[in-house]
Amino acid sequence: MSDGVDAAAARLREATRVVVLTGAGVSAESGLATFRDPGADPSDPDAAYWSRYDPMQMATPEGFHANPALVQRWYLWRMSRGEAAAPNPGHIAIARLEREMERRGGSCTLLTQNVDGLHHAAGSRRVHELHGSILRWRCARCGTPATDIEGPPDDAPATCRCGGALRPGVVWFGEALPQDVLAAAAEALDRCDVFLSVGTSAVVFPAAGFIETARARGASTIEVNRDPTPITSMVDVSLQGRSGELLPRLMDVVFGATD
Ligand code: OAD
């Protein structure tokens, strides 16, 4: 095999502690849109989100306060798409990596920028959601968790008992990532010997900076991505293609074919 799978497998075989960082690309083969795609056609209903919507309107506290009902509707729509989606072979391969590493006395920590819950659905357990979850809502005013959130009636936003508008439990631009998640990420990165980046454009910080931390620690670095990214020239092994195809192959080479 000359496409780098063997080279990546050799690094994983030697590893004791692996950190996987994922982005929207890992869920693309589950039918969920990514955020950025330079070739996207904005009239295509499945095109990358930021070619069709303004991130300042949909993914900032200011955008939410300006029009909470609009933002609620957008996240409820995305949530319903996510709930209808199933994990794909890429998610399943990452869950397998965790199981196999633990079986041989090591560990695999998954840091995901995704809010769709598909890694949990695939069986990953050591998962840290850097950007929160679209499945957990809360009151933007008092913080009370919201259950059974329903679509807001036309222009009025869905509200909490206190009158505050409900918001999804995701991290927006300009907001801090959860402290406990950042601490868990820092600890895992500080101890890892392989860092595997999957399906992320590697432009949104702090996740985009994790590779530098891992490299400084002496970890081997592998990227699995459909397109080149700013970290492609930095990694030890770059696998260019779809994660739902490459990751299962990679796991089979490292741990043996499953059937
Ligand atoms: P992006 O949409 O920026 O990047 C997705 C990456 O996945 C791109 O580099 C694609 O080439 C790649 N890709 C697409 N399909 C793939 C496939 N089948 N297999 C492998 N790679 C594939 O998504 P993220 O990097 O996750 O934050 O974006 C980071 C953050 O920016 C998101 O969490 C979100 C967004 O704004 C917030 O909303 C706060």
Image: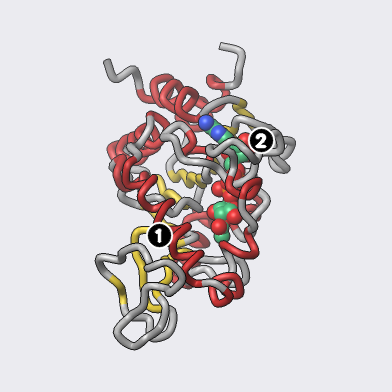
| Closer to us: 14 or 247 | 247
Q: Is disc 2's CB within 8 Å of ligand 1?
A: no
Residue of label 1:
133
Residue 175, placed above or below residue 208? below
Q: Is residue 221 visible?
A: no
Residue type, label 1: Ser
Task: Give the mark nearer the N terminus: 2 vs 1.
Answer: 2
Point 58% across, 75% down: residue:
66
Point 25% across, 65% down: residue:
148
Q: Secondary structure at mark 2?
A: loop
Q: Give percent across and percent down for residue 16.
A: 43, 41
Residue 239, placed above or below residue 3? below
Q: Is residue 87 left or right of residue 244?
A: left
Point 36% across, 78% down: residue:
159
Q: Is residue 87 left or right of residue 174?
A: left
Residue of label 2:
41
Q: Secondary structure at mark 1?
A: strand
| Closer to us: 129 or 135 | 135
Residue 213, placed above or below residue 119? below
Q: Quadrant of residue 244?
A: top left
Q: CA distance from mark 2 to mark 1?
A: 27 Å
Point 65% across, 46% down: residue:
51
Looking at the rendered image, the quarter that the N terminus falls into is top right
| Closer to us: 204 or 67 | 67
| Closer to us: 219 or 82 | 82
Nearer the observer: mark 2 or 1; the answer is 2
